[in-house]
Amino acid sequence: MPFFELYNYWIFILLMMIGLYTIIASPNLVKKIIGLSVFQTAIFLFFISLSKVAEGTVPVTVPPAEVYSNPLPHALVLTAIVVSVSTMAVALAILMNIKQAYGTVEEDEVDQAEAH
Amino acid sequence: MAFVLVIPIIGALCIALLRRRPDYRDAASVITAVCLFGAVLSLIAQLGVKPFQAWVLFELLPGLRLAFSLEPLGMLFALLASGLWVVTSIYAIGYMRAHHEEHQTRFYVCFALTIAAAMGIAFADNLLTLFIFYEVMTLATYPLVTHHGTERAVMAGRLYLGYLFATSIGLLLFAIIWTWTLTSSLDFRSGGILAGKAENPTLLILLALYAFGIGKAALMPFHRWLPAAMVAPAPVSALLHAVAVVKAGVFCVMKVVLYVFGIDLLHDTGLSVWLMYVAAATIVIASLIALAQDDLKARLAYSTVSQLSYIILGAALANAAGVLGGSMHILMHAFGKITLFFCAGAIAVASHKTKVSEMAHIGRQMPITMSAFLIGSLSIIGLPPLGGSWSKWYLILGAVDAAQMPLVAVLLVSSLLSIAYLLPVVGRAFFASGPEQSHGHEIHEAPLPCVLPLCVTSAGCLFLFFFAGEVYEFLAPLVQR
Amino acid sequence: MRDQVILRVVSKITAPFILVFGFYVIAHGELGPGGGFQGGVVLASAFILYGLVFGLAELDAIVPRRVTDGLAGAGVLLYVVVGLVGIVSGYRFLDYTPLRVTGSESAESWGMTLVEYGVGITVASVMITVYREVSQAGAAEK
Amino acid sequence: MIRNHLPALIVIVPLLVALVMPVLGRGDKPWLLATLASWASFAMTIVLQVQVSGLLRNPAATPAIISYPIGNWQVPWGIEFRVDALNAFILLVVAMISAVVTFYARLSVAHAIPPERVRFFYSAWLLFISGLLGVTMSGDVFNVYVLIEISALASYTLVAMGRYQNRKALQGSINYLVLGTIGAGFFLIGVGYLYSVTGTLNMADLSTRLEPLHDNRAVITAFAFLLVGLSVKMALFPLHGWLPDAHGYAPPIVSALLSGVAIKVGAYIMFRLAFTVLGVEFTFAKLPTGPVIWLFATLAILVGSYTAIQQTSLKRLLAYSSVAQIGYIALGFSLANENGLTGALVHIFNHALMKSGLFLVAGIIAYRLGESEIGALAGLGRKMPFTMAALTAGGLGLIGVPLTSGFVSKWYLVSGAIDRGLFPLAFVVLVGSMLAVIYVWKVVEIVYFRPASDSAAKVTEAPWSLVFPAWILVGASLYFGIDASLSSGLAQEAARFLLSQS
């Protein structure tokens, strides 16, 4: 059944949607950032699942195995993880400043404070 | 050639530098005007002697040049604008001082820049140059319209910019770029550049875009800016909104008809018939509105709207008599209308009256001014022995040639209408018994710098009647096949 | 957590091992799974563990702010300098050829190792800084 | 030696200097070093442009392509910087604007940011610039993602630094971060799909391998993701929500670079992917990209300009105007003919000059008045004649008045639309100009025709070190409106190059 054979896409899209939903629905900025993290992680999973070759082994063996998974996406994901960690760090730093400036990290309360 | 453009700009600089010394500044303004008129006159000699080489200032993009050249219609417009500038700058000195206006330096600087733009338009060799100076003129006249800085002036300024920019960017520029994509050329050529390059619906749309896009020609329904601009001081209304700006508009229409479409193309395809009727409608409707105006300047403004459409009508007729009549009307109407505006300004200076209904009795107090007003009115109406009669004569001839009898009727009716809106002003001024002087201060003639120019221009109206033949000869190359 | 004896002892004992493991991961990067990113995080975790247990002040005492700030730049600087060595010695940017170890078959070039160390140092100091900033703000809250 | 390493050095120099920034103390040293680095980059991009462009060496020559494999790993396995007629031009814009804006920064930054933070500001600033320069040259789609994120991360912090003036900057920054990250995530998914069908990330390699795969659904999906992701990055309507707050509350020089350059780099990647990687055939003939972008570009122009009219803060007005200007660029992109593309590319150049110049003027106003409300500008026409003249000149450029560079771009865009027979689009461009008249004139009217308030009575002209750089940009925008042969020549060369790629 091709529907389930490509389950990795389903999972990645599901996770991505959970992340996006959190970003959109949660008024709490920290939770938004968590949602963002879930969203990015979904993309990493997508990349990792791409690289899996059926019956493949670890690419680092001496002497090389006949069938091995593609190592490049792993390297890409590693880089992307670093980017995502940096994004998280910057986001948290901004949130700390927001907390300092407004005394809250709830978006509606921040808007309220600005409206006055 | 370069002098013509540079002189007013240098003049503007001098005026700006002399801002601390009003006497020198005003003198500089007059001297610049005289020099410019001289420079333009000197160009007449070059006209027609040999095929004039376009003077290219620079190239914006390949094929898109800022270039200037000489041709009779442009020469006429340049002579008109620069000649009347001399008169107007003298008038402006009298008017501005008598009124104790503020920001006089800005006023004179912008005035000079407007004239520079008018020169650019007059000698433009292609549509791009024309468009650029057209926009420069809009920008340069904006501070003049909002001169008083009052709420009403600012609102009028917005209306002014809004109409002129909206039409020029939205329609005129569109038409120019379209022409460019069709013909890969924007140069003015005798006989037009569009012939054979485009088919009927395209040409029709293009003509409409040009006719309405040149908002300065005040073709209805894009005429509202002109009455609004009347908040400006009288010299501005006189020179700019009776001569330089609006004439630049109809001049552009004339240029487009002659050198972009070519009258043969219009004549053969009958493309411009609808334009004749739009112009005719504008003539009649604007005259009717003018009848209802109590403010003298507003009445004159609507009269201008109506008279401009005479010229557009002449262009739209697309035959020799029509085009020549229209071109002559640029000149004739300019002299008539500037006289009327000078008079309106002089009345405002002397008596602070702007409404027609207040002007009873004023003819006895200001006989010279009101006599000039009478002469100007008669010229606008088109009665001999005044200049206006010739241009109307040729326009009617053109309409007959084109076998458009309804238009002949329109021209005649509108003459009657202009009698109805102009002559009562004179009649009231001379014959109505006015209220006794309540304020205790007697009304006299305006100061000499105000009165002198209006005498000169009204004399001009008379003079043009007798020298119309020369003007005709001068313009004749326009329609030579 | 300063009064938790077990935590204090365990963290003190494990910290050196974590550090060694971190360096191992960095050094092994060019041949096996590992490298500067992972190793750097492991290195940082030793310090963060120390900071968690003994408090921010103690952490500041062993790695002052200035050190982490400087090292964060220095790590990338090392990376870029290795790259520039390539240019200066007539190869491309980041070309490892001039830094190749001669006489050993198995060893990769010095260039790659240096780059991994540069990345590791930067990642470690940035992670420590992030931890420090966040916990400092948390302390200020109270 | 340096001549052969220009692509790498252009990025490395600002990066290297960014790293030593935190070690420097207070005072003007960080600014001085940053200025030197950005001008060095600018100088190198000029040389690179001359190397690439046929136009500058010999009008008949075709533009060259310079490939710089990093670490000398063989392409397509290694990563390369690849410079051709298109990105050499964009590179020039990025480097030029950054150089002038950095030169301007000294007083403005000292005014907007506490002294102990200044060096970090410049560090992030140079990272931002080197990220943008890197994105422009990268010949590898994954690297594009990484470098976009490097510059974006730096720009999030830079925007957040606006908090010392107005705490709303924090909100703007976090919104920008969330949306920017989602956009980059979509881009990454698109890259993943392309990789899954081709197994390569190198752009040149991708384009050859994708040729037989144009009917593949994964490729179409990839294109959709890439398009949406990049639309967020370039703030194309309706994905522009982050832009007004981020550009409106950031420190003025940051806004200048964001509005003038950063969104253009997103647009550049769109050009790159659509034309050189996927090909005109796929993007415009097979998929209805054109009509979709026409719709959004039209809405961007109309809604952006209309919203700009309603703003009361100068910086937010300029920000909304940027939304509209991106609409013009997208419009030119979607026309996919020579005039349209030339118009879009030359507008990238011209708008960068005008908008950065205007934001610098807004910075001068903030420096002198401490705010950027339009009402506060009343009567400044006489108090700060040079600054306000720059404001007016830049504004006229936004309108597209002839003899300003805005006119040149609109000329090409309208011709492009007419060439395609799309008269409504040509009209939209012109309607956008009319709306621009309203929002520009709203400001000019207050500046020149409203009497000064009491607080503004003592204001004097700003120091020349602020006014001069603003005038460099505004003056250049006027110059390229009068003699457009250089800017439009390079843009045309790039447009022809793009169309020859498929």
Image: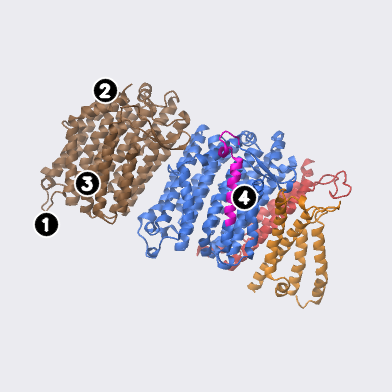
Chain colours: A red, B brown, C orange, D blue
Q: Which residues are magenta?
A: D36-62
Residue D133: percent from left, percent from top: 62, 50
- The mark closer to the camera, 1 or 3, is 3
For the stretch drawn in magenta, what is the main secondary structure?
helix
Tell me if label 4 and label 1 are in contact, CB under 8 Å: no
Residue under pointer 1 = B440
Viewer-side label of 4, 2: 4
| Crowd class of label 1 (few under 14; some 14 to 19; many from 20; radius 10 Å) | few
Q: Is residue B233 left or right of residue A91?
A: left
Residue B106 in the magenta stretch? The answer is no
User: Compared with residue D12, is residue D403 higher up or lower down, i.e. above or below?
Assistant: above
Instruction: Give coordinates of residue D318: x percent, y percent.
Output: 49, 52
The residue where tag 2 is placed is: B400
User: Could you tell me how far apart the alpha carbons at marks 3 and 2 are, in whole angstroms?
Assistant: 42 Å
Q: How dense is the environment of label 3, judged by Cα within 10 Å: few (below 14), some, or many (20 and up)?
A: many
Please give the chain letter of the residue carrying mark 2. Answer: B
According to the picture, the residue beneath numbered tag 4 turns out to be D133
Compared to residue B344, the image places residue D376 above or below, namely below
Q: Position of residue D230 (x, y in %)?
A: 62, 46
Image quadrant assignment for residue C128: bottom right
Tell me the element at label 4. helix
